[in-house]
Amino acid sequence: MIFHAGDLTDLDLLNGLSIIAPTYAVKGNMDDFHPDLPYFREIVAEENFSIAISHLKNEAYGKKSPSCKMIIYGHSHIPEFVQEGGIWYLNPGSPSKPRGGSKPSVAILNIINGIPEVEFKLAPPKADE
């Protein structure tokens, strides 16, 4: 599965990701071009472990189900993986527009026996860096 937490900015990106794997995306503040994208969605990843997806970190908290164990968000474009109040929060960063001094990144998420494991994949440096 691929999760995209908003700011797709281009419908072709969503279509391309959907070719690779089932893709679940939400609307970010840069996605006015796609009126059908929801602002929030929740996906069952495994039994008793669902993942809420929202562009804004706190927007999903009030909408999530009791089985939600993780919130994926993206607005800050800064990679983060933390647990607060029994909920895991994951921001994969951004592969194209990182902020806050972070490098271009995506996150690989594995859930093993209800325990999330995250590995951030960083873009390699450019030849002139």
Image (cartoon, helix red, strand yellow):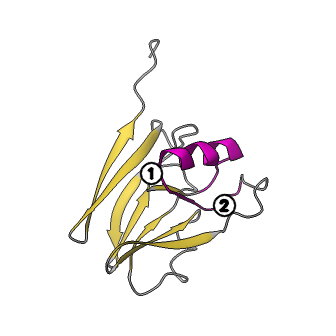
Residue annotated with mark 1:
92
Q: Which residue is drawn at 46% across and 85% down?
A: 65
Instruction: Give whichever of 20, 87 is nearer the camera.
Output: 20
The mark nearer the N terminus, 2 or 1, is 2
Q: Residue at x 36, y 40 (%)?
A: 121
Residue that protrudes farthest toward the front in the picture:
19
Region in magenta: 6-29
User: In the rendered view, would you say 26 is above or below 42?
Assistant: above
Instruction: Give whichever of 13, 88 is nearer the camera.
Output: 13
Q: Does the magenta stretch include residue 11?
A: yes
The three-letter code of the residue at mark 2 reads Lys
Give residue 11's position: percent from left, percent from top: 70, 47
Placement of the C terminus among the 4 image quadrants: top left
Placement of the N terminus among the 4 image quadrants: bottom left
Left or right of 43 in this view: 10: right
Quarter assignment of residue 123? top left
Residue annotated with mark 2:
27
Q: Which residue is drawn at 59% across and 62% down?
A: 55
Give residue 72's position: percent from left, percent from top: 47, 63
- Crowd tier of the residue under label 1, counting other residues whose Cα lies within 10 Å: few below 14, some 14–19, many 20 or above: many
Q: Which residue is drawn at 32% across and 69% down?
A: 83
Disc 1 on helix, strand or loop?
Answer: loop
Q: Which mark is residue 16?
A: none
Residue that protrudes farthest toward the bottom in the picture:
66
Give residue 100's position: percent from left, percent from top: 51, 44
The three-letter code of the residue at mark 1 reads Pro
Left or right of 39 in this view: 116: left
Between marks 2 and 1 in the image, the one whose residue lies nearer the viewer: 2
User: In the rendered view, would you say 80 is above or below 54?
Assistant: above
Instruction: Give whichever of 6, 81 is nearer the camera.
Output: 6
Left or right of 60 in this view: 12: right
Q: Judge whether residue 125 can be spotted in this image.
A: yes
